[in-house]
Structure formats: C-alpha cells, structure tokens
Amino acid sequence: MDLAATILVDGLIYAGWLFIVSVGLTLVFGVLNILNIAHGSLYAIGAYASASMVGAYFALGGEAFPYGSYVAMILAALLVALVLGPLLERGLLRFFYGRDEVLNVLVTYAVFLILEDVMKLIWGVNPYFVYEPYTLLGDVEIGPLFYVGYDFAVIAAAIVVGLAVWLTLNKTRVGKVVLAVIHDSEMSQTMGVNVQRIYLGAFMAGTFLAALGGALTAPMISVTPGLGVNVIIVAFAVVIIGGLGSVPGAAIGALMVGISRAASVHLMPEAELFIIYFVMAIVLLFRPEGLFAKTQARKI
Amino acid sequence: MRFNLLLAAVIAFVVLAAGSVILPDWAMFLFAMALAKGLVCLGIVGMMRGGVVSFGQGLYYCLGAYTATLVANNLGVSDIFLLTLLSSAVCLLVGMAFGPLLSSYRGIFFAMLSLALSMVLYGSLSKMSFIGGTDGLNIAAPTFLGWAPEGRPLQMALYIYVVAIVVIAGVLMRIYFDSERGLLTLATRDNELRVEYLGASVRNVMTYNYVFGAVLGGIGGTIAALALGHVDPEFAFWTTSGEFVFVAILAGSLSVPSVFVAAIILELVRSFSNLYFPNTWQLALGIFLLAVIVVLPKGLGSLVSRRKGSPA
C-alpha cells in the first residue's frame, strides 16, 4: 500500500514537472506546425536565468523577504520569452513556415546546437546552485512519507498553467482566434486575423512555458551544461503520446509518463531510462497519431 | 547505363583507395569514420526518397557496433568480414521485425517512433553493467582473413575495407534506387494514395527501404566500432541519430556519392571547429547546418543535377 502511494505521489510530482515542460512544445506545434527541438535549450536557458535572478535577488538583500525569489523566477522566464521568443520566431522560424515538418525539426536542431554553446559562453561551465526557494516551503508529511513542500508547489503550478492555457484557448476571444488559425491559417487571414502576430504570440507563450519549466526546476537541481538534451526527448515523448497540438493530451501524456517512470524507479530500476520511450512506442502502436490527435483528411 | 555505373564505381574506388597512400594518419582515420557514418546516412537517404526520415538510425549503428564487439570479445572472432556479416545479419533480423511495423507511419510520427526505439536501446545498454553500462566496451583490432596488421598497415587495411564496402553499397543502392521499387519510393513521396490505387503496395516499399537502412546502419556501426576500438551507448543516443539526419539532409536524396561527400564534410567541419573553436564547435556546426538548409534546400546532390540540366 505504501509502495503504491509512494509511486502515485512521486509520479504526480514528476508529471507536474513534465506537463509544464511539454505543454509549450505542444502549443507551438499546434499553431506553428514546428516540432521545436530548441525547446530543450529554452528550458535550460530558463533554468540559468532563474538561477542568476534568484542569486541576484538574495545578493541584493532579498533575505528579508525570501518569498520574493519566486517572483524573481517567474520574471526570469518572462525575460527569456521576451528576448528569445521574437528573436527566434521573427528572425528565423518564419522563413520556414509551410516547409516540410522534418526539415523544420532540423532547423530547430541547429538552433539547439547554437544555443547549447551560447549558454556556455554566457554562464560558463560551472554548476549553479540556488537551493533557497526549494527549502522555503518546508516539508509535507503524507502518512509515513516525507516530501519537500516545493515539489507539491510544482504540481500546483502545473495545474495553474494547464487551466490558464486551456481557459485562454477556449474561453477568450484571443484563444478562439488562435484556434481558428490552428484550424486554417489562410482562411483566418482572409477573415482579417493578423496571423503573423498569432504565430509570434504562440511562440512567445511556448518559450515562456519552456523557460518557466526550467526556472521552476533550477532550485531542485544543480544547473549545468547539457541540461536541455534529455529534457527535450522526454517532452517529445509526452506530446507524442498525448497527440501533437493537444493540451489535454499533454496532461494525460505527462501523467502516463510520470507514473510509469515512478513505478519503474521503485519496482524495476533497470528500466528507468527507457520506460518513457517504451510507453511512447506502445501508445504509438495502438494510436499511431497519439491519444488526442485530430483526424485529418488525406489529399488524393 | 550499367557500364557507366561500373566505370564510376571503379574510378571512385581507385580515387578513394589512393587516399590510403596519400593521406596522413589522422585524415585516414577521419575519412574511415566519415565513410562508415556515410553508410548509415545512405540508409536514411533511401527512406528520405519515400518521404520519411528516421531520427533513430543510431539504433542500428549501435546494434551493429555492439554485435561486433560482443562477438569479438566473447567468441574470439576477429575477422572483419565475418564480424561485418554477423552484425549486418542481426540488424537485418531486427529491421525485418520493426520494418513492417514502422512502414505505416509517416512524417513526424515515423521520426519519433524510430527515435523511441533507439532510445530504448540506449536506455537498456546504459543500465546493463555486465556489458560496460555507460562506459561501453573495448574491441580489439580486426584481422583480415587471417592477416593481422598493426600500426599504419592496419589503418590502411581498414580504410581500404571501408572504401570497398562504400563503393559496393553505393552501387547496389544506386541500382535499387533505379529499380521498380526504388522508383515507386519516389512516387510514394509525391502521392501515396495514388500509388496504392495504381496497385502497388506502399507498405512493402517502405518496409524494404527500412530494412536496407537497418543493414547499412549495422555495417556502418561495425566499421566505426573497429576503427574506434571502443563502443558505448552514445552510439544510440538521439544526438548521434540527429547527425546522421543532418548528413542525409546535407546530401539530399538525388545522388549517392553526395552522401559520402556530405559525411566527410561534416567530419571535417566538426574536427576543425573542434580544433579552432574548442568551446563553440556546436555553435559553428549549428550555423553551418542552418546555412546548408537555407542555401541548398535539396542538398549537395542538387548542385550536380542542376548542372546536368536534368529535373530533380
């Protein structure tokens, strides 16, 4: 019983993190039709920016009000989105709209390679530690188990992010316009929608979510080079399982991957590294386009 | 047509093999590795002609390398011909198991499912401490039908072996590309349903392309393992596969020799940027990749066919 509870809680914590990391990826794919490998780099840049901002916050006398470091983390993610979002979308990606999907994967792979080194140039290769925000929320006791409160804050953040994205898309005017662009960008343009701006906005939102994932993770780990390499493939697995472009799909995918990884860590540690891809392969075998994919007509 | 092909093959072999005398040691190693990787990329190009790109060709590269290493270390086989044959047989079987499955996937889903398979292998190998885990394994230098050279002669022998395999594989793939099934592959990329309505089986075509890719990947992995003397799970990591795709895109699907030219260019760009910008070689590689995509969207091969004036 304890084991099942442990697996469930560990799985939920991991799923919360996974969801934040992957929902931006699925959003960008849904709108721009680009599977963004550089999403992993944006995540890593978010982590670095957050580590720097939190470090600066405490250096400037933030000890008096340590909770302000959470604001610093979110500001760091916003900053990354405001700088890199327009730079990448306007400066590069817009030239590749409508090109082959796989070619676009390669374009973002190039961006990924470039950003990996840019990060090393800016932040060096030594690890950054910012543990303060991680310990602020104390511990949580569930039956015989102890958890760090911050982990549950990540789950809460994931729920907030999920609701915010879903409500924005489905209940606001802007969201409806975005859905229209996803459905048919040419038709939306003839109806007077500024499609360019929607693309830019969606990409910036995706960048923000990637950076936010990194920013929230920074206090839990030591921020080192190569952070993005593993994250991106895990995020791919989540969005592929859920169906590319689907926000509820990303949530289900994150839950499936999170819980199966937690189960594997506790029951079969040897499988920990590949269980994620194994789940992805199984899902694709039965649902070739993921769980929540829209059906599409084929041209003859 | 066939005569021209044979002539081109002989010329290619002579020119490349001459490198064994001319090239300094470091360059010969670099060329051998590039050509071995080029074999893997040739497999991807075969699939690309049908409109799908495998982001998990590291699976077969790694599988071939590990098969050769395990056979060499545990069964005492050191003959390069036998090792190549065995690991390509293993890759053939695995390719035949996954091929029919993957043949119904397209676009991003084909890419991601093949990537998932290669990452499963990466994850398993990393956790198997009895075969080295993430450290990998060493493999002794190969022998050539009983002849066991050392030093420079070993390098030369290995290099000439790669060149021979590359030329043979190149000729066979050219013949395959021009065959009925090879041409159906091109038609599939243009319009899959139409091919089905005309009575051909798209799945069959895709399966063949995948299986050829698997075998080529296995041979490439075997040679790379023997040249390096070491294998590790990174062979199956997604960034390795990403590089193969990079070479395939750089080469384009129009010409077979351009695949190997592209592989050599990538290795050269990588070694030199490693040498001159040790901290920013990935940046240099990324910029180079973007430049290629922008300037040569159809790959190096398009340079040649544009000059000939033949349609792509």
Image: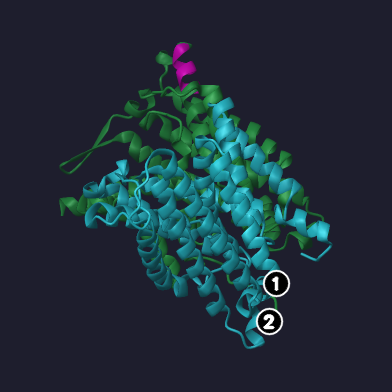
Chain colours: A green, B cyan
Position of B1 relative to B232 (above/below): below
| Badge 2: chain ID | B
Distance (Cα) linking label 2 and label 1:
9 Å
User: Residue B72's quadrant in the figure?
Assistant: bottom left
Measured from the top left, where is residue B45 in percent x and y?
60, 61
Position of B25 relative to B217 (above/below): above
Q: Amino acid at mark 1?
A: Asp
Q: In which quadrant is the C terminus of chain A drawn?
A: bottom right
Task: Name the one closer to the observer, B279 or A123.
Answer: B279
**Would residue A220 be found to the left or right of residue B262 on screen?**
left
Does residue A211 appear in the picture of this structure? no
Measured from the top left, where is residue B122 in percent x and y?
37, 51
Q: Residue at label 2? A: B194
Q: Amino acid at mark 2?
A: Arg
Mark 2 neighbour density, 10 Å: few (under 14) some (14–19) many (20 or more): some
Q: Please tell me whether residue A178 belongs to the stretch shown in magenta.
A: no
For the residues labelled 2 and 1, say whether their Cβ atoms are less than 8 Å apart: yes
| Badge 1: chain ID | B
**Would residue B234 be found to the left or right of residue A115 on screen?**
left
Q: Residue at label 1? A: B190
Task: Name the one closer to the observer, B9 or B89.
Answer: B9
Q: Residue at x 73, y 46 (%)?
A: B294
